[in-house]
Each structure stands twice: as structure tokens, then as C-alpha cells.
Image (cartoon, rainbow, N blue to C red):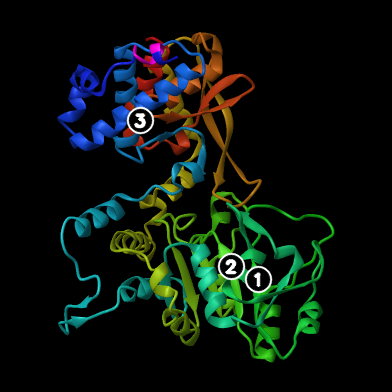
Amino acid sequence: MSTAYRGLPSVDKLLAHPAVAGLLQRYARAVVVGAVREQLQAARQDVKNGDPVPSPDQVAEAVAVRALHQWGPWPVRVINATGVILHTNLGRAPLSVESVEAMASVAQGYSNLELDLNEGRRGSRHQAVSELVRQLTGAQAALVLNNNAAAVLLGLAALATGREVVVSRGESVEIGGGFRVPDVLRQSGAHLVEVGTANRTYTDDYVQAFTGNTGALLAVHRSNFQVVGFTHQPTLTELSEVAKEKRVPLLHDLGSGALLDTAAFGLAHEPMPQESLASGTDLVFFSGDKLLGGPQSGIVAGRADLVRRLAQHPMTRAMRPDKLTLAALHATLLHYLRGEAEHRVPIWQMIATPSDDLRKRAEAWAVRLGDGVDVVQGLSTLGGGSLPGETMATWLLSIAPMLHPGGADGIARSLRLGTPPVMVRIEEGRVLLDPRTVLRNEEAELTGAVRAVLGR
């Protein structure tokens, strides 16, 4: 075995190889040497397992590939042709041009993030965005955190640590990514009290659960699944009356954060923060990067005294958003304030696009691609745990699997590994591309990528 190892190239020989020498021009020598040694160690293990000794060229190319994966730009831009608008794996909501410009502006220099320019003294990073949230939702005050899970956790920790929080058993759910309501309650220091059943809970169930140690009522919007049939759940107005009578706050984990009425676009109605507050909720928690269409963030809106308690909690500093998030969120909220969100916020542009426009775009792609592709009817989805089961009619570009030696899977893989990567979906053995989720300025790249994969 030691004889076989002698066939491996030395570190110095690999550093002189053109594939590795190019890395030395771009990266620190110590980092490249470390990558070479790691690859040689991996090669020794392969030889020990019975694999043939790799040539110096093979080892050098492996180092270059490793460098590309580890040191290349990340994350990379992806063209989303899946038809899933809020695709969690692809970063959810793309930002508006104005939001991106706002981020770039504050990223390239200094800003008044925590400076009151009028007074020339320390200011609040939350004030500007919170004022917009207040105006858009009717809340007395608002607070922005780094995501909605953090917002819920902070709310429970600040208002109910060591106390009981009453939740309907049908709402003691897992929202996604292991985010479970019972776990969040435990981490916050609050104690979960489940009432009712999985499908039916009544106002009296909440009333009967009250003790001298009850700290809050918590309502959770079941955003990523549906319960149908023999069901009942009290309205927020009814829960608000109970909470006021018992003198505890009503908290509402809303999730998606739609500031526009989804029913106006032919979808089921998604509960809105402003509706929650109008129904008597004391604090509502929602995301900034789902149906609001902004950057990843969590927003708390509601009673000023309760928001103040959250803002003063020690955990708030650990959960606060940075200047880039606040700049992008501020610009996104301004679209709603100006009444232009449907035309400027990308996810609402996608939701609002008429079916005829999608058909024309798909047909234009088909003309550029030639034989073996068709335009067919299909469905788009919202994704991101919003409006489960709801779909939107669309038109799809369909690629026949026989156009590639690897079939449909081969086409999808080649597109996924291209530059830029293109994500598609496969149904009934055909590759489908949905123009609804492809940005207008990506169309030339998309058709070019498909032509390359099909050898055209």
C-alpha cells in the first residue's frame, strides 16, 4: 500500500500545476496549500479503499473543482421556472428594484441607522420602518426582528415567561423547518395549555382553561395546511372578548403577512395583519419575506405598551435586523403606501399577471427553441406555506424528454448545473417551465440555457 501512495503527486508538484497555480493568483497561498493537502488526504483514503491511484492531472482538477464549490460566489442567482412563487429553497420573495437599490445605497457607505439627523444624537433603528407598519396596519406601534419565528419567541418570552399560554389543540402545529408551537413555548419559558380538539375548539374551552397563572391567549394561523369537514374555531373577535374580560393579551401568529387581499386575484382570502388588529388582537406577528414580498424579517404590530415591552427585552438585541434588511423592508413597505405594490413588488406582479400574458410569453419561448417543445395549460402555486391547495391557471413550456440522452431528469439536471442555474419541474415525464416565476429580464438567459442543454 505504501508503494501505491508513492504514485501520488507531491504538494509542490500540485502547486505548480496550471489548474492549481491559477488559484494561487486569486487566493492566499496558505489556503490553497490547505486545499491541496485535503485533496491528497482524500486520494490516499480512496487508494486505501481499493481505488486506482489518481494522476497528478486528476488530483489538480479535483482541487480546482473543490475551490470552485467552496470559494466561488454564494448564494448564486437562480432562475425559478418552477411556478412556485414563494419557493423556500430558492430564497422566497425576490425584492423590488427599489428595495435592492436601497440596500446597495446603505451598504456602500455609512447611514443614519441609529442617528437622529435633526437632533444630532442617537436614534432608533426601528422607528422609520415601524412608522410605515403602523400606517399600513392601523397598529399603535410596531417592531421589526430578523424573522417571524424570532418575533413569536420574543413575544412569548416578554409577556408570558413562567406563565400559561392557552392555545387551541388544532393550532398547536409545526409551521415548517421544525418550528413547532409547543417547542417555541418551552424555549420562551411559557407553559403550553392546549384546549379543544384537533378539529373543534370553542370559546368556552379557553374560558375554562384560565387560572391565576394564565399569561396570554395565542391564536396560530394554519398557513400551510387545511382542516376541513366537521370543524369549529372561535373568531379573533370572540377570543379578543375573552382576553379583555380576563385581562390578558391576545397574540396572533399570522405567518404570511399579506397586506393586499389575495381574494382580489382569484385566490382564497389570506388573513391580513390589519384585519387581525381590527378584530381586537393585541399583538400580531407576521413575516416580511412571504406575501409581504420583502426581505427575511419578522414584524410585531399592535398595542404600544406591549410592543414597548418587547423592545426593552434583553433578547431583542440578539434578534434585531441589520441595516440592509431594514432598508429593503422600508422600500418594500413604501410600495404599499403608494398603492403600487401590485406593479412594483415582484411576487404581486407574478400573482397579478393575466393568463393570456403568460401564454404569449411561453409561446415566444417555444418559437425560439424550435421543435420538440409545446405550450400547455397548467397551474402555478404560491408556496412558502401560504394558501395551501390554492393554485393559479398558467401556461407552461413543455419539453419532450427524447430531446436529451438523459431524458427529463437529464434535462432538469443539466439546467440546474448551468450558469445561471435554472430550476424546472417534471410532471408526467415532461420538463415544464412556468413563465409566471421567471423575471422578464431573465428570459433571454433562460431560452439560451435551454438551447444549450438541447444542443441547439
Residue 452 image offset from top left, x and y in percent = 37, 15
Prevailing SS of the magenta stretch = helix
On screen, residue 100 versus residue 286, left or right, reads left
Q: Residues within 10 Å of mark 3 (few under 14, many from 20)?
A: some
Q: Residues within 10 Å of mark 1 (few under 14, many from 20)?
A: many
Q: Residue at coordinates 29% horizontally, 62% vertically from top-left?
A: 327
Q: Which residue is mark 3?
A: 38
Q: Earlier in the sequence, mark 1 or mark 3?
A: 3
* Residue labelled with disc 2: 253
Find the distance from the CA under tag 2 to the CA under tag 1.
Answer: 6 Å
Question: In terms of image quadrants, where is residue 311?
Answer: bottom left
- The answer to whether residue 448 is left or right of residue 207 is left
Question: Which type of secondary structure does the marked residue at label 1 adopt?
Answer: strand
> Which amino acid does the dot numbered 2 rest on?
Asp
Calculate the distance from the C-alpha at mark 3 to the C-alpha at mark 2: 47 Å
Find the magenta span and give its range: 3-7
C-beta proximity under 8 Å, tags 2 and 1:
yes
Q: Is residue 86 above or below residue 111?
A: above
* Residue picked out by circle 1: 219
Residue 291: x %, y % from top left: 49, 55
